[in-house]
């Protein structure tokens, strides 16, 4: 699968890692012709490195301006996920979907407030965005996990095809992904969530705390 001229021009403006991310998303991983230099494992390692070096608990604490000793009402909650909107996306052979944009989130809980830090990291360009919010428990209407729809920049579906059958088929469609939703008066925070099963118990603890505080 050759690289088209538009993509080639884009790649020339990118760093080596950013080039590898884009190629991983759009080029075949097996078969004939030009292929991605990265495997799924290589990409996963790159994501983990980005999360560790460009975000983290201390960065969240600093951005929120909180004293961690005052936030022991519930143990801090950490999760991350892929954001699909306007991102390069790849549906892997195992059916999972990854993208060139990730979001890291930290939640802290004091006696009266919930603090939320999130950071978006674009793996295909030099771009980041962070938010630091705080809400009194009485103002939080609901917390939940829901599936939402996003429109990617591109979606490539990988298969195990060989030389006689292209491995990747580029599609344009809406993707569904899980989000942790925090609803407050006049606003709703949608936070990317890759593996919801890992934090289900913690979310139940947050709901219980909200009920407790509202009764109090």
Image (cartoon, rainbow, N blue to C red):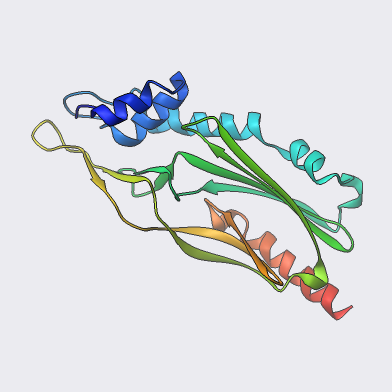
Q: Nearer the viewer, residue 97 or 199?
A: 97
Quadrant that contains the N terminus: top left
Q: Compared with residue 148, is residue 9 higher up or lower down, i.e. above or below?
A: above
Q: Nearer the viewer, residue 10 or 130?
A: 10
Q: Compared with residue 182, is residue 93 higher up or lower down, i.e. above or below?
A: above
Seen as rendered, the residue at the extreme left is 164
With 167 as the anchor, is 18 left or right in this view?
right
Total marks shown come to 0
Residue 156 lies in quadrant: top left
Seen as rendered, the residue at the extreme bottom is 215
Give me the residue at 44% from left, 23% from top: 14
Task: Using the rendered image of the protein, determine whether residue 38 is visible from the camera's viewpoint.
Answer: no
Give me the residue at 79% from left, 69% from top: 209
Q: Compared with residue 147, is residue 154 higher up or lower down, i.e. above or below?
A: above
Residue 32 lies in quadrant: top left
Give me the residue at 78% from left, 76% from top: 211
With 196 as the anchor, is 67 left or right in this view?
right
Task: Using the rendered image of the protein, determine whether residue 34 is visible from the camera's viewpoint.
Answer: yes
With 154 as the anchor, is 114 left or right in this view?
right
- x and y, in percent, of residue 57 in the image: 74, 40
- x and y, in percent, of residue 44 in the image: 47, 34
Q: Nearer the viewer, residue 183 or 38?
A: 183
């Amino acid at each position: 699968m050759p690289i088209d001229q538009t993509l080639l021009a884009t790649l020339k403006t990118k760093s080596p890692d950013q080039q590898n991310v884009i190629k991983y998303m759009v080029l075949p991983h097996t078969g004939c012709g030009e292929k991605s230099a990265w495997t799924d494992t290589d990409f996963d390692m790159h994501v983990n490195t980005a999360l560790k070096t460009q975000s983290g608990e201390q960065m969240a604490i600093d951005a929120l301006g909180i004293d961690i000793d005052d936030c022991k009402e519930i143990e801090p909650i950490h999760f991350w996920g892929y954001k699909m909107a306007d991102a390069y996306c790849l549906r892997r052979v195992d059916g999972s979907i990854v993208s060139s944009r990730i979001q890291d989130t930290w939640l802290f809980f004091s006696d009266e407030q919930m603090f939320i830090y999130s950071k978006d990291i674009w793996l295909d360009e030099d771009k980041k965005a962070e938010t630091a919010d705080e809400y009194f428990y009485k103002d939080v209407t609901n917390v939940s996990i829901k599936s939402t729809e996003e429109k990617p920049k591109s979606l490539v579906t990988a298969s195990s095809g060989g030389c006689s059958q292209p491995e990747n088929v580029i599609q344009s469609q809406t993707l569904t992904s899980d989000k942790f939703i925090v609803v407050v008066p006049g606003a709703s925070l949608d936070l990317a969530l890759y593996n919801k099963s890992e934090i289900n118990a913690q979310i139940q603890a947050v709901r219980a705390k909200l009920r407790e505080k509202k009764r109090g």
